[in-house]
């Protein structure tokens, strides 16, 4: 059984929400970033990766768990990389047995996160984000609701940047995209949109955007995880830094890249426009499946 996740004093006790369901499954959510950072199903195995070098002081996003990228994905816009939601302190709106709802509004965001690199305000739109985290039998559900509380329409992109813990990266197979054309950020333009042949395998850097499949299956000899995303999440991002980029990331330990893959539920290829008073929802469900060794 996996040992409980340890957190620095800066992250607890007021900055951490512990959830436990009747079947014994558990999750831990950080208010910094509104971020699920640990999930154990009833079998006790940790299914999310959290770097032991993750920063908890707000100077950078927490490396691991399920960061919320909003209202911008990566550097596809004028804000800081992946937007500001993962950098802010969220609030608990409701909590029950195995469930929690966190909220973030414009008033919760430090002013500089609303600016571009030149210090100009580029986001000034009233909003309310709600993150619903629900423990289900053998599964974790995370849903993001985006409310426009202002008087004008605005647009965004988003992703749930899930870091999934793995035991043997070399033996890992990600299934669900065979025959699908994808965008390869590592290959650049040579070619930028190849067709996936068979399972996705890892070892070197992988940074790809796929049209969202009906489901993903993360297959290891001793563990299987099924990954579903809502139809509103129209793309999936698959990422692992590999050994070279991984060594350059200060908040990853040596060989930390070999302990996770990211399979992200995303809507990033075009912007989502929310009218005044409107709401958009998107989410991801992670489900434990029987393994080959079960």
Image (tube, rainbow, N blue to C red):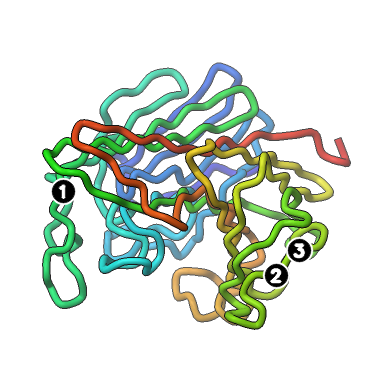
Q: Which residue is mark 3?
A: 201
Asked if residue 206 lies left or right of residue 178, the reply is left
Image quadrant containing the N terminus: top right
Relative to residue 194, is residue 172 depicted above or below?
above
Labelled disc at residue 125: 1
Callouts 3 and 2 close, C-beta under 8 Å: no
Relative to residue 58, is residue 215 depicted above or below?
above
Question: Distance of mark 3 from mark 2, alpha carbons?
Answer: 15 Å
The residue at the point 69 percent across, 45 percent down is 216
Residue 1 seen in render: no
- Numbered disc in front, either 3 or 1: 1
- Front in this rendered view, residue 239 or 20: 239
Tag 1 or tag 3, which sits nearer the N-term?
Answer: 1
- Front in this rendered view, residue 252 or 234: 234
* Residue 7 locus on image (x, y percent): 41, 50
Callouts 3 and 1 close, C-beta under 8 Å: no
Mark 1: few/some/many CA within 10 Å (<14, 14-19, 20+)? some
The residue at the point 45 percent across, 69 percent down is 251
* Residue 208 locus on image (x, y percent): 60, 65
The residue at the point 71 percent across, 57 percent down is 180
- Numbered disc in front, either 2 or 1: 2
Mark 2: few/some/many CA within 10 Å (<14, 14-19, 20+)? some
Q: Which residue is mark 2?
A: 194
Asked if residue 124 lies left or right of residue 281, the reply is left
């Amino acid at each position: 059984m996996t040992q409980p996740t340890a957190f620095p004093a800066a992250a607890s006790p007021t900055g951490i929400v512990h959830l436990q369901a009747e079947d014994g499954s558990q999750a831990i959510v950080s208010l910094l970033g509104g971020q699920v950072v640990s999930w154990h199903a009833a079998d006790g195995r940790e299914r999310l990766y959290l770097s032991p070098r993750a920063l908890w002081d707000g100077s950078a996003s927490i490396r691991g768990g399920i960061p919320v990228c909003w209202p911008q994905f990566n550097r596809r816009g004028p804000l800081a990389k992946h937007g500001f939601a993962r950098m802010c302190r969220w609030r608990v709106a409701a909590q029950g047995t195995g469930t929690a709802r966190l909220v973030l509004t414009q008033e919760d965001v430090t002013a500089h996160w609303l600016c571009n690199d030149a210090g100009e305000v580029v986001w000034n739109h009233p909003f309310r984000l709600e993150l619903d985290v629900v423990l289900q039998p053998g599964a974790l559900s995370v849903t993001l609701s985006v409310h426009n509380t202002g008087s004008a329409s605005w647009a965004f992109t988003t992703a749930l940047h899930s870091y999934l813990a793995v035991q043997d990266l070399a033996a890992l197979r990600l299934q669900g995209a065979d025959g699908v054309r994808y965008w390869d950020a590592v290959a650049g333009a040579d070619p930028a949109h190849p067709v996936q042949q068979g399972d996705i395998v890892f070892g070197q850097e992988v940074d790809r955007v796929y049209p969202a499949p009906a489901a993903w299956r993360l297959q290891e000899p001793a563990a299987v995880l099924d990954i579903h995303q809502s139809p509103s999440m129209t793309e999936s991002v698959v990422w692992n830094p590999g050994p070279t980029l991984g060594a350059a990331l200060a908040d990853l330990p040596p060989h930390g890249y070999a302990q996770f893959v990211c399979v992200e539920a995303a809507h990033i290829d075009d912007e989502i426009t929310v009218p005044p008073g409107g709401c958009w929802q998107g989410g991801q469900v992670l489900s434990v499946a029987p393994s080959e060794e079960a």
